[in-house]
Amino acid sequence: MDIAAYMADVGQQARQAAAAVARSTTAVRNRALLATAEALESARDQLATANAIDLERGRSNGLDPAMLDRLELTPARIDSMIEGLRQVATLPDPIGEITNMTYRPSGIQVGRMRVPLGVIGIIYESRPNVTVEAASLCLKSGNATILRGGSEAIESNQAIAACLARGLAEAGLPETAVQVIKTTDRAAVGELITMPRFVDVIVPRGGKGLIERISRDARVPVIKHLDGVCHVYIDSHADPEKALAVAINSKTQRYGTCNTMETLLVDEEVADDLLPLLADAFQAKGVELRGCSRTLAVLPDLVAATEQDWHQEYLAPVLAVRVVDGVDGAIEHINRYSSQHTDSIVTENYTRARRFLTEVDSASVMVNASTRFADGFEYGLGAEIGISTDKIHARGPVGLEGLTSQKYVVFGDGHVRS
Amino acid sequence: MDIAAYMADVGQQARQAAAAVARSTTAVRNRALLATAEALESARDQLATANAIDLERGRSNGLDPAMLDRLELTPARIDSMIEGLRQVATLPDPIGEITNMTYRPSGIQVGRMRVPLGVIGIIYESRPNVTVEAASLCLKSGNATILRGGSEAIESNQAIAACLARGLAEAGLPETAVQVIKTTDRAAVGELITMPRFVDVIVPRGGKGLIERISRDARVPVIKHLDGVCHVYIDSHADPEKALAVAINSKTQRYGTCNTMETLLVDEEVADDLLPLLADAFQAKGVELRGCSRTLAVLPDLVAATEQDWHQEYLAPVLAVRVVDGVDGAIEHINRYSSQHTDSIVTENYTRARRFLTEVDSASVMVNASTRFADGFEYGLGAEIGISTDKIHARGPVGLEGLTSQKYVVFGDGHVRS
């Protein structure tokens, strides 16, 4: 197979389909989403058969149990793909919204209209349900999509692709509006991320290694999410009850998510009082604490943290703890070690809260709230294709709006410039 | 000189300075702008001396007259740099604006705060006044800047840099908040565009060749402006008077700008009536017309346009003319040949205007208005660092907002996620 020729063909088809999707009405795109849901419903047997092939091959290739679990399309996961499509259909259509329409002194009227980006390339790993999730958000926002899933899920992804094609056809949209790459050859990724004439943006979803590799090699803009080294800072003016609640929830509500706290910072003025309470609460949850030297002065039984711990995204019941000199020390630590994902201060002090909000340079900055809230659904975006740790284009949780652009629209009445 | 080490040092200084600028108040940044204006005012002699060296070297290196003209810092151009600084000081500060603050069902309050991008790299060619223009917009929007001007303007740029340094120092900001690269070695550009840890975005200003080269090699996001192949489409339902006014103004108000019309499209239903009137008007202005075969059928004396003409950004008194089959033909031509900069329809027909607005995929889409309006000042942005033909981040004229990002701010009262 000539991968470059195949991918150029996929790209060209996507570019053509993108124009049709951009022109389509809200009703047509919603129809495609709902028809895909119906197609998945009636293809449960085919999905199970395809998935069984992937699982069987995965087992014989020695995939680890966690990866096999992510690969599995259980009936409940098919239910949730179907439910997801229906939810996306109910979201407001972002496309066509015109904002800031104003008259200018010249007499022209100028505003901005929200438009699709065009063609979005999604690169992801083992979970086949991402195929539906990503395709539905791109379609809702008027874009064409090229999907490249993990090679271990190729049969499942192709079975899902067939349902998407049926849904699109039923709504009268080109089936090429969503294309799932048919080859597992890695060269296809290399092509996908270097075709700026066919692809407008790449959204990689997966581990830090994958995303770093793609960002380095891409010749197309990448909306990327590297890691989540999130902090909670407990200020000396914190309400101790809120401090405990926020710290415990930020770490223990779920361990494996990018918005989980990985380092706890405690103002030295309250370290003696609060660290023992925090240690008890975390130990009751089974969280291992690793402390700086000043933390160890209060809690001598802890493991000592090393420089590496401040950089670490544990994604596990392990927490680094550091005593800092007030809000200045906290901001300094965070702007040095944070991955600029989500950081929270607990304080009752107005000026310190305001300084933290302004000076911490992260995608989400919070006061008296758990870092676990950093999420497209919690923020009211209605959906989330990922969380961007970039500053360009989209920052923080990326919903439908992040998959769009704005163009200027100008209304005149024969106006000319003088 | 070790260029890599020098540029890493510049980058590191910029990154540090960016934090100080981001923290600074509106008043401090405005003070720096006004103090720079004063410094330029009192450095007129030094500017003239430095510029004379550049001009002398340029002449002996055989620079062409147009380039020498762009290089010259006349007293009027110094006036306009000073005036520009004062105007930027009067613009509203975009930083810190919080929008869309809403309560979520969980009880948290979520909004978005406008923040600086961080460090902006500007790469430009001969005009030394760009140094002040770009630095002032970046500073106003809370960013640090690294500027790389043309080697032919190095003395002038360093003299301007000294004024910027004085202005920054007077306002108590680090002088490294604006750095003008001191070497003319081309390797410095290569370093600047591949330092993502120090530089957040690159804005190149110059010819298409420069910008394509930078976009290809950059490892940092680029806000780019390639070319302006702009169209006016005269629909059969156009008011002929408006059609003539818009077409003439779009082409002839200025020939060398990116928002100048380069191809005129005429609906075949009105070609017989309008083409002769248009030809007379353009010929009176000295514009050479190049027509498609259907245009030549009406105006047999014209030069025949070739495929190349539809792609051409003339920047000169030359205009390609094509007869198309209604709004469908116009949209098809534009989406194929336009550089997605600015395209305008002249029509009285509601549905055709609406279709053109929706289906033409360009940064600015207009109805009954001259393409020459596509400009940051005309759109009310107060300033313009360039016009983006990208869809990611900023599209169309880029003002202060394009030099910023938004972060999420979350207010709680000890809220945790359940």
Image: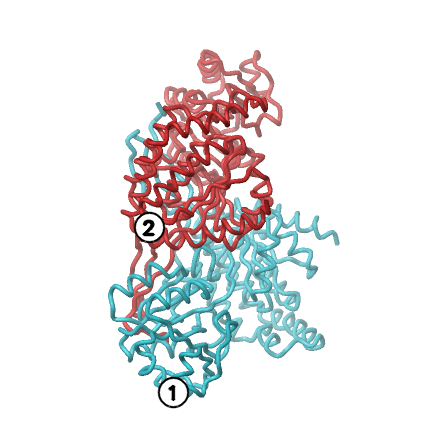
Chain colours: A cyan, B red
Q: For residue B246, which quarter of the picture?
A: top left
In percent of width and height, residue B76 lies at 36, 24
Q: Which residue is mark 1?
A: A280
A302, B379: nearer the viewer: A302
Residue B267 in view (yes/no): no
| Residue, far right | A1
Badge 1 density bin: few <14, some 14–19, many ≥20, Cα 10 Å: few
Give the chain of mark 2. B
Q: Which mark is drawn over residue B95?
A: 2
Q: Is residue A263 above or below residue B201?
A: below
Residue B41 position within the rendered picture, expressed as x and y whole percent measured from the top left: 33, 31
In the rendered structure, the answer to whether residue A177 lies left or right of residue B232 reads right
Q: Is residue B75 above or below residue B415?
A: above
Question: Does residue A62 appear in this view?
Answer: yes
At horizontal 28% and vertical 65% (from top left) the residue drawn is A352
- A180 displayed left or right of A100: right
Q: Is residue A93 left or right of residue B188?
A: left
For the point 43% across and 54% down, which residue is it? B16
- Where disc 2 sits, the SS reads loop
